[in-house]
Amino acid sequence: MTTEMGFDIIMTDYSESLPNVAVVGLGKIGLTLAAVFANHRYNVFGADINPDVVASVNQGTSHIQNEPGLDELVWTAHHNNTLSATTATAEAVSQADTIIVIVPVLTDEQNQIDYRMIDRAVEDIAMGIKEDALVIFETTLPPGDTENRFGKMIKEISGLRPGQDFNLAYSPERVYSNQIVHDLQHYPKIVGGINEKSLERAANFYKKALGCELIEVSSLGTAEFAKVAECVYRDVNIALANELSMFAEEKDINMAEVISASNSQPYSNIHSPGIGVGGHCIPIYPYFFINKGLSEGLTPLSRKINDSMPDYAITKIEERIGSLSGKNILILGLSYRGNVKEPTKSTALRLIDQLQKKGANTFVNDPSFSDREISQYGVTPLALNNQYCSEIDGVILQAFHDAYNAIDFSHFTKCQLILDGRNKLNQKEINRLGITYEGIGNEGGLTF
């Protein structure tokens, strides 16, 4: 039996002795890893501090939505008794030969690295780890942290030495929301170890547990650096597109035409500009270099450019409709990108902050979030069929969900401007209604 994403689902013989794996952190990536391992002849103990997450997993239900194939994998693993969950991390670790760590490392409001969640998890791991276990970190980390922070922490608490009494490896997650199951099978897995034995054990584990292509690198630091470098590359290229789009507007040039023409050259791959960059990765991981010494150059400059795009968008709106004080402004999309329920570092949060500072009445629509969830951000939720849409003065498309393909803007009778932050809306239809359309980089939206 095979999932729609390609992984085989194995109906396990309960009498079979399976190797034990602990997955610490059951978020969207951790739960997917746990479910895939549990369907590939491993007995998996999931650990998470959220009791609701633990309860759902122990009922055979995924708390993660919109991940194709995940519901089926979790249910099958539950049915086979190969996946269970607990809030007692040390207990789960004590039963495992292999421990996968996938607990978030984020940045605070000052863009300093916040280790609190993963430090707590590693302390628990150190309390339960047994000799000769294999610990693999998948969380994106600043280079050096696997060995110098977490290997050291485990040694200090457990007395076990990394590379001697237990094996230590790093293999960064490299997946994309809404296609994690697919990516685990199709993206090469980068693996580094503290020594040859750790690398060999980690590589052998992933060959059996995922069956994907492996890229074995020479050190933990190389593997850590590679993951952060991927994100910096994307951030820099998005910043270039945004910088060029703003310059194109000054010169009255359509950036969409420029991109199409320029990218006809095989070595050119100019990205699409946009209102901002959000999520767990791109707005966060460049600081893992910046805060460790890369304080000048393209990496910090790109962060400044991309973080400035919401302010730039607000300025464009003010130039079109004047002061925003007392104006009713609707943001489409609380999530950081389309068709994902994830507000972490979303551009919407920056827009909300700037609009409120300017005295605007701020409304938000996002089909993935409940009214209560939206209200927690200090804004008013607004359904697109609500009669109050007729009182909206301006609309900002921040995240393009599929549901926004069918928006009927004829109900927005007072609306003066729609700022299309993703260059996705139907410019022709918006203009036909007498509403000004504004894209990023003088780009027009779809004209179907």
Image (cartoon, rainbow, N blue to C red):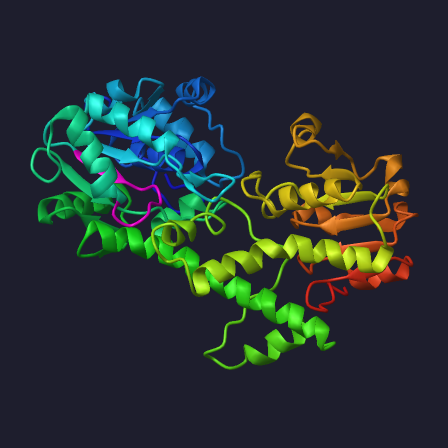
Residue 298 in the image: state x and y as whole percent.
45, 65
Secondary structure of the magenta portion, mostly? loop
Residue 422 in the image: state x and y as whole percent.
66, 57
Magenta residues? 134-144
- Where 160 sits versus 67, above or below? above
Q: Residue at x 52, y 45 (%)?
A: 279
Q: Residue at x 71, y 73 (%)?
A: 250
Residue 200 in the image: state x and y as whole percent.
13, 47
For the C terminus, the quadrant is bottom right
For the N terminus, the quadrant is top left
- Outermost residue on the left side: it is 164
Q: Residue at x 58, y 45 (%)?
A: 336
Q: Is residue 354 left or right of residue 336?
A: right
The answer to whether any part of residue 5 appears in the image is no
Which corner quadrant of the image does residue 24 belong to? top left
Q: Is residue 141 magenta?
A: yes
Which corner quadrant of the image does residue 188 belong to? bottom left
